[in-house]
Image: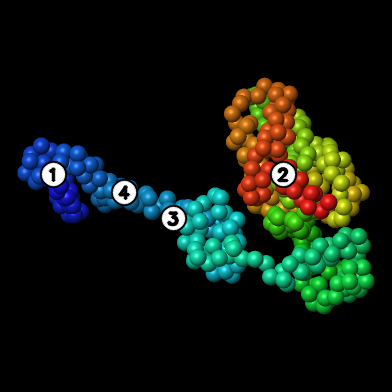
Amino acid sequence: MSKSKRYDEEFKQSLVNLYQTGKTQSELCKDYGVSQTALSKWIKQYSQVKLEDNSVLTAKQIQDLQKRNAQLEEENLNLKKSKCHIHAKLKVRLLAVYRLRFEHATTTLCRVLHVNRSTYYKFLKHKPSKRELDNQIYRKQILQIYTKANKRLGVKSIKVILQRDYDTKISEGRIYRLMKNMALPKMATVKPKRSLKEVQKTYPQNLLKQEFNPDQPNQVWTTDFTYISIGYKKYVYLCAILDLYSRKCIAWKLSHRIDAKLACDTLELALNKRKIEGTLLFHSDQGSQFKAIEFRKIIDDNNIMHSFSKPGYPYDNAVTEAFFKYLKHRQINRKNYQNMKQVQLDCFEYIENFYNNYNPHSANLGLTPNQKEENYFNSIN
């Protein structure tokens, strides 16, 4: 069997130029021994187009430019989303690739952020060192002391209590670094004087810092709102609370109004369902509903540490955002609802039956949220 002929770019362009002078495709095919299909394809690719600035490009060149432009746009978007640059520390770039791995190809992310792919995959397999594991324990102990003392203790006092109550002996410098890492402010003996401009720029602290994998249930809960259409310009609002350990939706409520009452009702439902032992970190965005007096009272009465996302930065609450994304993709967007009762029934079926009880979650290595929690409680009993 004879091999198919290979034609260079110059040959193809020359045939197209001859075609544009008036020769027919049949004549050219006969004279140059090419197929009608190939010639037609070349004519589409290599016919010249005159641009506004009088420059001339072929259709193929335009297509290549469009492809390159799309690639550059994606790379630019990746850099913006990653919130870092190619000169950032390697660990920062590795974490950025990991955070965006479900939104863009890993190969593209590594190329844009100048990360070697083998380095990234080695980073994924990294096991925490003994010091890192110890620091996880110390952070938990420091947070418990800091919360119990109502944020009134500094490094020296915390060091004493760590040794007294937990038999933990670490230096003041290490405590200071751990508190700084958790964004826990150190004690000050003089009340700082700040201008009105500085006060206006002060935002509640992000204590979670995108650490989405606690080591047991009821350590970190996250929450947010989403809207669901029930007709022309009519909506109901869903508030949901997730436990980050298992990604389980532990409480959810619907309302015609997105207000503090909806947030309070959902949090109270979660607290009634779960037995909280130790310190609970509760993460939300900076919505006014979560700063309302009645909501703050529930937070304070239950000794809960409240963490807030940075303004306009949804990645700080990425797990809850993803929960709503798949809820709408898999269930809500498939139907046209006319009233809240219909939404209530579908949300119940999706959350309580499908999501919590049936759907394998990637963060749980294929286990459902209910299975992940069941395995944990069986292991400690």
Q: Amino acid at mark 3?
A: Leu
Q: Nearer the viewer, mark 3 or mark 2?
A: 2
As shown in the figure, which amino acid type bears the numbered disc 1?
Val
Q: Residue at x 67, y 49 (%)?
A: 364
Location of residue 351 with respect to 278 vertically, above or below? above
Marks 4 and 3 close (CB-CB < 8 Å): no
Q: Nearer the viewer, residue 125 or 250?
A: 125
Question: Measured along the vertical axis of the image, is residue 332 above or below residue 183?
Answer: above
- What secondary structure is marked by label 1? loop
Q: Nearer the viewer, mark 1 or mark 3?
A: 1
In this view, the residue in front, 140 or 146, is 140
Q: Are marks 3 and 2 in contact (CB under 8 Å)?
A: no
Q: Compared with residue 333, is residue 187 higher up or lower down, i.e. above or below?
A: below
Q: What residue lies at 73% left-to-right and 28% top-to-bottom?
A: 344
**Sequence-first disc among 1 and 2:** 1
Marking on residue 34: 1
The residue at the point 78 percent across, 39 percent down is: 251
Q: Position of residue 250 (x, y in %)?
A: 77, 41
The residue tagged 4 is 62
Q: Which mark is residue 72?
A: 3
Q: Are marks 1 and 3 in contact (CB under 8 Å)?
A: no
Q: Disc 2 and disc 4: Cα gap in Å?
A: 53 Å
* Earlier-in-chain disc, 1 versus 4: 1
Q: Earlier in the sequence, mark 3 or mark 2?
A: 3
Spatial separation of the CA atoms under disc 1 and disc 3: 37 Å
Q: Point out the frontmost of discs 2 and 4.
A: 2
Q: Secondary structure at mark 2?
A: helix
